[in-house]
Amino acid sequence: MPALPAAPYPEEVHARLAADAAELIARYPQPRSALLPLLHLVQAEEGFVSPTGIRFCAEQLDLTTAEVTAVATFYTMYRRRPAGKYHVGVCTNTLCAVLGGDQIFAELQEHLGIRNNETTEDGTVSIEHIECNAACDYAPVVMVNWEFFDNQSPESARQLVDDLRAGREVRPTRGARLCGFKETSRILAGFPDERPGANDESGAGGAPSLAGLRLSRGEALPGTPGTKVVSPRPESPRSESPRSEQARPEQARPESPRPAGNGQEGSEA
C-alpha cells in the first residue's frame, strides 16, 4: 500500500481522539453519519481541519481521504487553515450588506491588517465574510466563534476586535459567553459545555424575532403601549355541518297542448 500523504497524529493524541471518536460514532446507526462531528473533533485539536485530521476521520469511518475531503471542503464552518483564538465572521449577505455589513468587513480588514480567511500575527483574531448568519432581524450581524453580536457598526466592530486582542471580557448580545475557537469546535462536535451555567445562557428569541408573530396577533410591540399596527385577524365562524347546496324550487312548467284526435301521438293524417 502506498504511504498516505499526511502524517498520523502522535500516539498520545491519536489514542485520546480515538476514544472521543468511538463515543461519537456509537451515537449513529451508520458510522458514516458521524463524519461531521468527527471533523469538528479534529478541528478542536488543531484549530482547523488538517490533512492529518482528514486521515484520522477516514481511518475511523473506513472512508477514503477523498470522501472526507469532499465533505470538509463543502461546509464553510470547517477551516482549511488555522483560525485565531477568536474567529470573527461578518455577514455580507443582502440585508446585512445594505445595512453596513460590507463596510464593517472592509474596515475590519484594514484595522487588523489582514484579509479574508487570514489571522493576525499574534494568533488572536481571524476574520471571514459569512454569507448569512441567520439573524437578519438583527442586521448587521457579526459572529465571534459562532456567538451573536447584533446590530453592529464599524465603530463597535473595531472596538470588539480590540477588546478580544487585549484580553478584555466580551459578552455576546445573546447566547453563551465566549470560549476559544477550539473549545467551541469541541462543543459543536457534540460534547457538553463544561463551563458552569453556560448552558443556561443560550436564551430565546428576542423582540425583533418575535415582532411578526406579535403583529399577526394584533398585539402592541415593545415600547409602543396601546399601539397596534394591525388588527387581530378575525376568525371566521365555523358551521357544525358542511354547507349543502339547497335545491331550487321547481317552477311550474306550462302544459303543452295535446294533439287533437284519438289522443295518440303521431303525425297529422
Image (cartoon, rainbow, N blue to C red):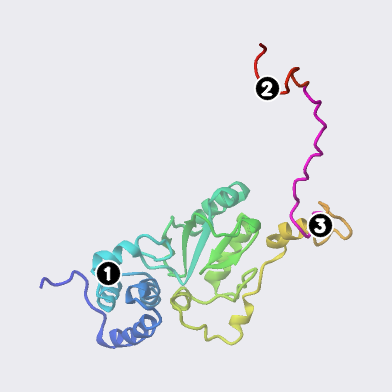
Range drawn in magenta? 233-256
Q: Which residue is rendered at x = 37% and y = 78% of the image?
A: 29
Q: Position of residue 159 (x, y in %)?
A: 60, 63
- Name the dominant secondary structure of the magenta segment: loop
Tag 2: Cα neighbours inside 10 Å, few (<14), some, or many (≥20)? few
Residue type at numbered disc 2 = Glu
Would you identify the image quadrant in which residue 82 lies?
A: bottom left
Up-down: is 231 above or below 18?
A: above
Secondary element type, mark 1: helix
Q: Which residue is rendered at x = 78% and y = 20% of the image?
A: 257
Up-down: is 171 above or below 197?
A: above
Residue type at numbered disc 3 = Gly
Secondary element type, mark 2: loop
Q: Position of residue 210 (x, y in %)?
A: 71, 62
In the current view of this chain or complex, which residue is farthest to the left? 1
Gap in angstroms between the C-alphas marked 1 and 2: 102 Å
- 265 sits to left or right of 1: right
Relative to the observer, which residue lies in front, 127 or 193?
193
Residue that badge 1 annotates? 51
* CB under 8 Å between discs 2 and 3: no
Gap in angstroms between the C-alphas marked 1 and 3: 56 Å
Relative to the observer, which residue lies in front, 25 or 130?
25
Quarter of the C terminus within the rendering: top right
Would you identify the image quadrant in which residue 258 lies?
A: top right
Gap in angstroms between the C-alphas marked 2 and 3: 73 Å
Kindly identify which numbered label has been placed on residue 265: 2
Relative to the observer, which residue lies in front, 17 or 7?
17
Q: Is residue 27 magenta?
A: no
Residue that badge 3 annotates? 218
